[in-house]
Structure formats: C-alpha cells, structure tokens
Image (spheres, helix red, strand yellow):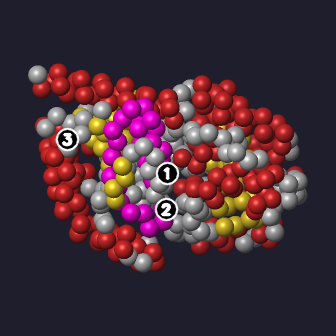
Amino acid sequence: MKVALLDPGGFTPDYDAALASALASAGGDVDLIAAPSPWFGWPRPEGYRLELAFARALAGAPAALARWRPLRRMLRALSFPGDWRRLDRRFQRRPPDVVHLQWSLAPRFERAWLARWRRRGSAIVVTVHNPRRRGGDRGPTAASVSLAASSDGALFLSRWAAAEAARTGDPPRRHAVIPHGLGPPPGYSRAEARARLGLPEEIPIVLLAGLLRPYKGIDLLAEAFREVARTLPAARLWLAGRPCPPWRPTARRLAAPELAERLLLETRTLTSEELELRLVASDVVVLPYREASQSGVGSLALACERAVVVARSGGLPELVGEEDATLAVTAGDAPELAGALIRLLGDREGADRIGRRLRSRALERGAGWREVAAAHVDFYGGCLAALRGESA
C-alpha cells in the first residue's frame, strides 16, 4: 500500500516520523511530505522517504528569522499554491493509495486538491488532532472537522476528540480512534538521567514539559505547588520548554519567593532527546491543562514509565484510564492537584510502580507503535475498499 503522509506546516516531526516508520515496518510504501520546522529537527528516516516539499524557503532562512511568526506565515502563504501544484504533478506520476493529512493550514484551499486526488482513486484520510481551537492558543488549527467530514475517513487520538467532532460538525464517512503510539522505554534509569543533568537523586521532582502555553494551567500548577512545598519542602517544580505568549503574567507568578527557590526553569526549545532525558529524570509528570484533546508529552511520559497526573479535561483522562482515577483531578482545582502531587511525591517508589503500570496498561489497550500502525493499515484498507466500491 502506497501511503503519502502530509504535514504542510511541519508541526509534529517526531509523531509523523514515528508513524511513518511504523507504517513502513508494517509493509507500507511510505512518503512523508512535510515542511521544515524552525523549532524541531526532522528525525532521520527509517524505512520511509522524507521530503520537505512545503515552504522550502524556511530551510534556508536563518533560525531567528524562520522563528519570526509574520515571516513564517508570509513564506508559507506565498509558496502554498506552488507547493500543492508540484505535489499534484508528483501524485500524477506516482499515485498513492492513501493520502493522509496530519495537519491543515488552509482547509478551503486543501479541500479542492484532496477532492481531485480522491477522484483519481486515492483514499483521503484526515487526522483531527484538536477538534476545536484551545483558549489562548494562537497556533494553527488542526485539520478541521469540516475537512474531515469530506474525506474518506477521519482519525482521532482520543475518544473525547471523536465525540467532540461529532457534536460540532458533520460526521465523516468513517472514523476511528487510534491513540498516540508508545515507543520502547529508554535504556537508562532515573539515577543515570539525573547524573547527566547534575541533579541530586534524593529530591522529589514534578515536571511540566513541552510548549509552555497559557491553556496548560501553569498558573494553577504554581498555586498548587505552594501547598506541595509546605508539605514536602525538598520537592522541586520543573518547567521545561519554550514559553508562548502571553508569558509575562506566568513569569511573575513563578518569581514569588516561595516558588522561585524551588523552581527548575528551562525556557527554551527542547530536542527529542532532551525531553526524554527530563521525563526519565522526573518522579511525576503533570498535565493540569484547562483544555486538551490529548497530549503527546503525556504519551511520551507513559513510554518513559512515569506517573502522570492529568486534569479531567478533554481526552487527558484516557491517558491514565479508569483504573487509575486518582491520577485525574478536577480541571482548575489547585487544592485537588496539590493533594495528588503530594501523594505521589511522598511515595516515590509507589509513583514508580504506577508509572510502570500506566505503560503496561496503555500497551494492553493497543498503544504500541506496531499495534498503532496495524490499526492505521486496517483503517486505510476500509477507506480504500469503500472508495473503490463507490466508484465501481
């Protein structure tokens, strides 16, 4: 089966690459066609072909300029029509069985090209990462629900996202929920990770990592951690990732004396390897998001066998499952969040057991990349069969 994975914005290199590699391992003939990312490098292809065919001017721009949002948007807009015309000529020469769009920049424009390829016999699949824009999120929207409705099939990473899409838009022809895949656990221990980072082994650490956005509830976490610090004075709060506007109000909260002396703060973009190292080095990973469809960082934390505390927001509770309901706290409730963190940080061996259990249960639910790839292949096959039956 020939599969063309498209990420026109280059938004999720690690996820796209892991999926492409898993599909190739399952026997797929996979092209990953994406854009350069000014923030994240693309992993070396394993079993698939990678072409950065969108917004190619970004690849030659200095990083500081490429990260300037107005310039990035202008370059994408100027190159977008030509990029899709070149892609169309490519698909004429080598038609894919499936065109799988991961992210959408301009649904109205993209819909015409997807419909064109569908008429030629390619099944169109769209992943809806986020069925609605998150509050305070200025980033690009995910492939829209309306675009998914006109495709042969829509994929969701959480049951909540599928239900939300059904509530807010027309249903797609077919849909399925396939979780974010889990890779193998890292080959080093927390003690080794902390040694590499120069952190003492004896201090309890709770980590929030990834893009530091307003909707992720960092202000709530700061409030909760004051209570954590009163109960467990040795505990540390670790924030690691690139801050996104508006950051100054959060920075002022973090500068409070009772937090500042217990805060590990890294305000920069982390590589995949750096993120994994920090996940392994932590005791607990926390996702106190006000809004969320799912969380790639949460899935990475499960892969690293970390205990995870999530807000009951969107699809986040699906990460920990009903069996570990005490790990899901009411969204926006700082005292409840503090209580959950205190329980875990006060029993680090118990937190480690929970982390191992979370990974094991996620794998039982089919979250290994091999199972995720098999589920994609089955879904692609159903979409193709329906399209060919419709055309017959």
- Give the labeled residue for mark 3: 95
Marked residue nearer the N-terminal end (3 or 2):
2
320, 365: nearer the viewer: 365
Would you place residue 334 above or below residue 163 in this image? below
**Image coordinates for residue 219, horizontal then vertical, percent:** 65, 60
**Start and end of the magenta stretch?**
12-41
Circle 1 residue: 14
- Rendering coords of residue 70 (x, y %): 35, 74
Q: Which residue is mark 2?
A: 40
Question: Residue lying farthest left?
Answer: 392
Query: Is residue 164 visible in this depiction of the protein?
Result: no
**Residue 29 on the magenta span:** yes
- Helix, strand, or loop for circle 1? helix
Quarter of the image with the C terminus is top left
**With respect to residue 273, does 62 lie above or below?**
below
Q: Secondary structure at mark 2?
A: loop
| Residue type, label 2 | Phe
